[in-house]
Image (spheres, grey):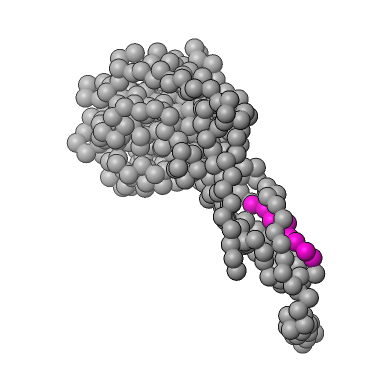
Amino acid sequence: MKKILVCLAILLLVNAFFARVEVKADFQTSAKAMCLIEKTTGREICSKNEEEKLPMASTTKIVTALTVLENCDNLDEKFKVDDRAVGVPGTSIYLIKGEELTVRELLYGMMLVSGNDAATALALHISNSIEEFCNLMQETALKAGATNSSFSNPHGLDEEGHYTTAHDLALIAAKALQNPTFAEIVSTRDCKISGNEKNSIRYLKNKNKLLNTFQGATGVKTGFTDDAGRCFVGSAEREGTEFVCVLFNCGPMFEECSSLIEEAFKNYSLIEIVPSYNYISKVGVIDGREEDVKVYSRKGFSYPLSEDEKNRIVYEYNIPENITAPIEKDSVVGNFNIYLDGKLLFSENVYAMEEIKSVNFLENLKEIIKNWNSNFLDIA
């Protein structure tokens, strides 16, 4: 069957003839490494040394929290914290021996005030040892697409073999933010959780200043050690577009994160390029009871684009000029691809929207026999 290749340059918003010259965004940072991506697609908007393996301090706890959430069935059941979680160096929520808290409370204690003891308690609740939990963290990272990370502890204190990249951590944070519980916790400005015999209630205040100063801020986590320097993962959402920014070893981390994400909002927005269940066209039918068949695609696709990029999206349809009946409903009849500047962004099958029977005698006879056999088996 002869096939035709239909290449359509779809101009979104304005004709390409009138497209404005794109102004380069001003993404500047003093960070040792940086990566800013759009949350749902993972598109990298800007970066610096994003593949360099570096210590990440308490931003490690993003991986810890997601690992716990993916391996815990009941967040609200109290349990006795492991003695090994008491007295962990660094930032603490001051757990004491024999204390009982819920997983949810410890997640708040870990993510808002960066309790290293809370991180250790959670790790030892999920696994029998820190080493075993770190293996789970590795699995969590790989599932998020992070392939250049290694974890030696759940809290982020400097340790040999404990590192990630800005790009890896951006991918992990983006996936974590898609978890409703994680998103709720890291966007909380302050809360209180159970105390102990020394303090009846623990009052927690989030260390992430962006939650109070930046429009649309949604998270995520601060961090600091001598080796890692000041580290920060920040995120913000406006009008359906959410960006995640990772900064390693950056003095003015809050200020620079705000500036970088603001620049991203200024220059990019998440655009629906193809809606779900999208009618495409009609295709001619040979030997069919109908002259043509409607075809459609199922999956929708959105992508963060600048104004100039909207005019450079190209749709490439690979659909037969004609299809021979019989045609089953929802059968694959072709495919299409979406490109930006020659880079493939999306590929999807094209399906028949309806059944088309054949006018061919032999084909009709086959259909009669098929139906007869089916009815006979049902009766038997």
Q: Position of residue 10 (x, y in %)?
A: 60, 39
Q: For residue 223, which quarter of the picture? A: top left
Q: Position of residue 368 (x, y in %)?
A: 78, 82
Q: For residue 162, which quarter of the picture? A: top left
Q: Position of residue 215 (x, y in %)?
A: 54, 16
Q: Residue at x 44, y 43 (%)?
A: 343
Which residue occupies the extreme front position in the image?
Answer: 17
Q: Is residue 327 left or right of residue 228?
A: right
Query: In the rendered view of the protein, which quadrant contains the N terminus?
Result: bottom right
Q: Residue at x 36, y 42 (%)?
A: 146
- The range drawn in magenta is 290-297
Q: Is residue 112 left or right of residue 316?
A: left
Query: In the rendered view of the protein, which quadrant contains the C terminus?
Result: bottom right
Q: Residue at x 54, y 42 (%)?
A: 314
Q: Any magenta on residue 368?
A: no
Q: Residue at x 70, y 59 (%)?
A: 283
Q: Is residue 27 left or right of residue 288?
A: left
Seen from the viewer's position, the closer of residues 2 and 224 is 2
